[in-house]
Image: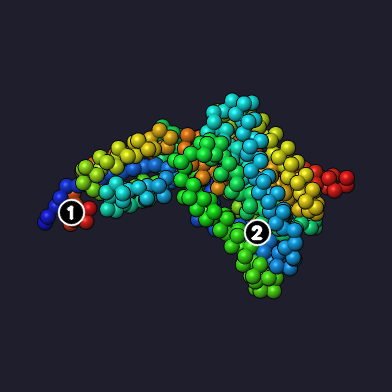
């Protein structure tokens, strides 16, 4: 097992045992900034060496998937789970959007197994963050004049994660591999260490969500455990159909199977205030994120490899 | 010394609302405000600032009584239903009354 996963497990165990352990919030912020920048830079450097050929249709396909996922998840939550409309819409937005930490573990996993993946996956990560949030708001509100779309778009597009990922991509793309060399020790050599510390804190945070699990009933837990797999399957199929490599197919599966716990909660809290933030965070952070880290990532690689034998 | 009595409005609410309040307070007549991070416990459970969505802020505004009432009414109508928020007022004595 990759040691970074063990750091996550340590965080979970320490959190469940009510240890005093806690990273200072500023450190956690810095770690997340480093992760986002590194992922962007990695993608940008590789993109600089490759032609953009055929990128536009793929961009459209990936964004379409970001719109379709919440539309598929919403009826399940609304009619099977009998959640009210705002909550179902909010959770659908979380599951349509993506988790950077899950993606980071995914690329660490591929690197440890020496499996290639396309650098454009970092771009897909950026693209998938936002559409589902917009769809979630429409599902909750309808196309209402009260929603301040301008402000919302500003917040989502200029949110920390998109700015840092896109910024990293562009810097990496402009600087290229040679230009980035002096920064390599800081960003790339330290990547796994940063990820390990980040996951330690994520473990603590995920553990703090567990206490809410019993209040929210059986459905939500089952939903959060089961739904990532078909969603990831959809991503894997799309990746395979687009002609991505095994690694790229697996990462697209990771992206579609993962769910947001930073961008989506912040946007939904303001845009759909009736939705309970505890409900969606418990599902995404307390159940789906650990599931993806421990079970999902190896499973999605298996999925990708199976598709490529067909 | 020239001491004047003003109202201190204190709002304790979710950190998610910081931007909204920053935008709305001047329009309600507040000439300034102070925001600090906070954590605590109330009817919506423990808000321990352990995660970006579970942090609180405390907003303080010193103003005239009419504006204090206007701020409180606005917050009640707009946020009380769906957000963790409390507002309270007290009298404070200030120098340089024209600043508020």
Residue A226 showing in the rendered view: yes
Tell me if mark 2 has few (under 14), some (14-19) or many (20+) residues whose alpha carbon lies within 10 angstroms of its own.
many
Image x and y of residue A264, in percent = 55, 44
CB within 8 Å, label 2 to label 1: no
Chain of the residue under the numbered disc 2 shown in the image: A
From this view, report whether residue B36 is shown above or below residue B81.
below
From this view, report whether residue B73 is shown above or below residue A216.
below
- Seen from the viewer's position, the closer of residues A33 and A90 is A90
From this view, report whether residue A174 is shown above or below residue A92.
below
Tell me where residue A113 sits by quadrant.
bottom right
Image x and y of residue B38, in percent = 40, 46
**How many dots with numbers?**
2
Tell me where residue A303 sits by quadrant.
top right
SS category of the residue bearing label 2: helix
In the image, which disc is placed on residue A39?
Answer: 2
User: Left or right: where does residue A251 sit relative to residue A80?
Assistant: right
In the image, which disc is placed on residue B97?
Answer: 1
Question: Which part of the image, by quadrant, shows the N terminus of chain B?
Answer: bottom left
Tell me if mark 1 has few (under 14), some (14-19) or many (20+) residues whose alpha carbon lies within 10 angstroms of its own.
some
- Residue in view at x 28 percent, y 44 percent: B9
- Residue in view at x 56 percent, y 36 percent: A139
Image x and y of residue A154, in percent = 50, 53
Residue A280 showing in the rendered view: no
Image x and y of residue B45, in percent = 45, 34
- Seen from the viewer's position, the closer of residues A137 and B41 is A137
- Residue in view at x 64 percent, y 70 percent: A174
């Amino acid at each position: 097992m990759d040691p970074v996963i063990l750091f996550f497990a340590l965080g979970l165990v320490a959190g469940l045992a009510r240890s005093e352990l806690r990273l200072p919030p500023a450190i956690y912020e810095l770690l997340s900034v480093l992760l986002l920048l590194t992922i962007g830079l990695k993608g940008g450097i590789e993109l600089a060496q490759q032609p953009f050929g055929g990128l536009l249709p793929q961009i459209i396909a990936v964004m379409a998937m970001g719109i379709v996922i919440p539309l598929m998840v919403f009826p399940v939550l609304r009619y099977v789970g009998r959640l009210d409309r705002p909550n179902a819409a909010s959770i659908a937005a979380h599951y349509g959007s993506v988790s950077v930490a899950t993606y980071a573990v995914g690329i660490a996993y591929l690197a440890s197994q020496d499996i290639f993946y396309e650098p454009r996956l970092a771009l897909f990560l950026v693209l998938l963050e936002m559409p589902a949030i917009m769809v979630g708001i429409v599902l909750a509100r309808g196309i209402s004049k009260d929603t301040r779309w301008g402000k919302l778009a500003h917040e989502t597009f200029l949110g920390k994660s998109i700015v840092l990922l896109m910024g990293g991509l562009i810097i990496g793309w402009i600087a290229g591999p040679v230009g980035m060399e002096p920064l390599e020790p800081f960003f790339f050599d330290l990547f796994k260490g940063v990820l390990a510390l980040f996951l330690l804190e994520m473990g603590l945070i995920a553990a703090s969500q567990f206490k809410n699990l019993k209040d929210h009933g059986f459905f939500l837990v089952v939903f959060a455990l089961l739904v990532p797999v078909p969603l990831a399957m959809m991503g894997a199929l799309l990746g395979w159909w687009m002609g991505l490599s095994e690694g790229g197919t697996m990462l697209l599966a990771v992206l579609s199977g993962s769910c947001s716990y930073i961008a989506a909660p912040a946007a939904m809290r303001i845009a759909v205030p009736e939705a309970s933030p505890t409900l969606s965070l418990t599902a995404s952070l307390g159940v789906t994120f650990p599931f993806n880290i421990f079970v999902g990532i190896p499973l999605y690689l298996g999925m990708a490899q199976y598709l490529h034998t067909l | 010394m020239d001491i004047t009595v003003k109202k201190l409005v204190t709002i304790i609410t979710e950190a998610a609302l910081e931007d909204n309040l920053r935008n709305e307070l001047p329009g309600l007549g507040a000439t300034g405000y102070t925001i600090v991070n906070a954590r605590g416990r109330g009817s919506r459970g423990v808000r321990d600032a352990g995660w970006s969505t579970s942090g609180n802020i405390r907003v303080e505004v010193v103003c005239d009584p009419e504006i204090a009432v206007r701020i409180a009414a606005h917050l009640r109508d707009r946020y009380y239903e769906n957000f963790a928020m409390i507002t309270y007022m007290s009298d404070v004595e200030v120098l340089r009354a024209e600043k508020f």
